[in-house]
Amino acid sequence: MVTSSDRTHARAVVVTGGGTGIGRAAACAFAERGDRVLVVGRSEPTLRETADTHPRILHLVADICEPQGPGTVVDTALERLGGLDVLVNNAATASFADLPGLEHESVQAQVQTNLVAPILLTQKALKALEASGGVVVNVGSAGALGLRSLPGNAVYGATKAALDHLTRTWAVELADRGVRVVGIAPGLIDTGVGVRAGMTREAYDDFLAGMTPRIPSGRVGAPEEIGNWVVRLSEPEASYVNGTVVTIDGGLSVT
């Protein structure tokens, strides 16, 4: 079996939504293992902060929801990294509203960012991933595993459930092309996503504190714990893992 220690070259990795949270943690974990990473997003300041954490991390300001976005990302990876071995579809957006309160712009933004963009980016990256025998890692959500409802967050959950379905389907479709597809389903992770979705920091902290007693592990997760699993599932040792969505949520989804 080929292992990580057998690798003779640094892998080329693209992480979307790499400016904050899980994306930043994954980028840093890849870089620490000797890989070269391109973090992609719409915010120059946060992307630069991620890139400043390690010399192997480069950044690209690009909107993957724009028609030319996926092509720009793949072309930049090939030019600056020399190829593409791992694609991490992590970028996502969320907003909170029940059905009567949904607004067209919010629904469209979530579907475009969380679902349409990963589809089109992975499609654009396929030739490069075939050439490298690469891996796609889709970052979903443990709240969207089909076991729970998500009142007030239904659109986000629906896009993440759809992303899990893509993981399973692509694993079968792309197996004979030598491309492996896996998913991560993070639970409650302190990424600050609630604040970015419009909550006050106080309300977000209260939410995390209120949820903590329901988690069997007794705590909220850290982005680094998810980032490390993103790397592990992309490594040669995990080459028999395909089409699987790995839940990392401290046991919350089984309560």
Image (cartoon, helix red, strand yellow):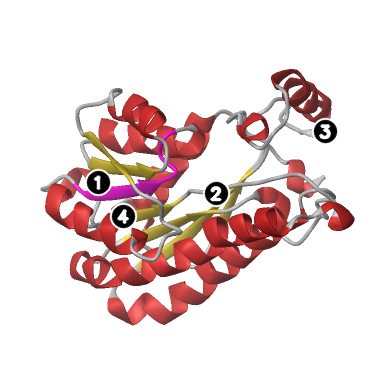
Does label 3 or label 4 sit earlier along the sequence? 4
Q: Residues within 10 Å of mark 4 (few under 14, many from 20)?
A: many
Q: Which mark is residue 86?
A: 4
Can residue 157 be seen in the rendering of this structure?
yes
Which residue matches tag 1?
4
Residue range corresponding to the magenta coloring: 11-19
Question: Mark 2 and mark 4: span between their CA atoms?
Answer: 18 Å
Mark 4 is on which residue type?
Val
Left or right: 254 in relation to 37: right
Question: Which of pointers 3 and 4 indicates the residue nearer the eye?
Answer: 4
Q: Residues within 10 Å of mark 1 (few under 14, many from 20)?
A: few
Q: Residues within 10 Å of mark 3 (few under 14, many from 20)?
A: some
Question: Which of pointers 2 and 3 indicates the residue nearer the eye?
Answer: 2
Can residue 7 be seen in the rendering of this structure?
no
Question: Which of pointers 2 and 4 indicates the residue nearer the eye?
Answer: 2
User: Where in the figure is residue 57, as x and y percent of width and height?
Assistant: 25, 34
Q: Residue at x 51, y 38 (%)?
A: 226
- Contact, mark 3 vs mark 1 (Cβ under 8 Å): no
Left or right: 241 in relation to 223: left
Which residue matches tag 3?
214
- Contact, mark 2 vs mark 3 (Cβ under 8 Å): no
- Contact, mark 2 vs mark 4 (Cβ under 8 Å): no
Q: Which mark is residue 92?
A: 2
Q: Residues within 10 Å of mark 2 (few under 14, many from 20)?
A: many
Give the residue furthest to the right.
Answer: 100
User: Where in the figure is residue 186, as x and y percent of width and height?
Assistant: 60, 44
Q: Quadrant of the C terminus?
A: top right
Q: Residue at x 67, y 49 (%)?
A: 142
Query: Residue 16 in magenta?
Result: yes
Does label 3 or label 1 sit earlier along the sequence? 1
Query: Residue 155 in magenta?
Result: no
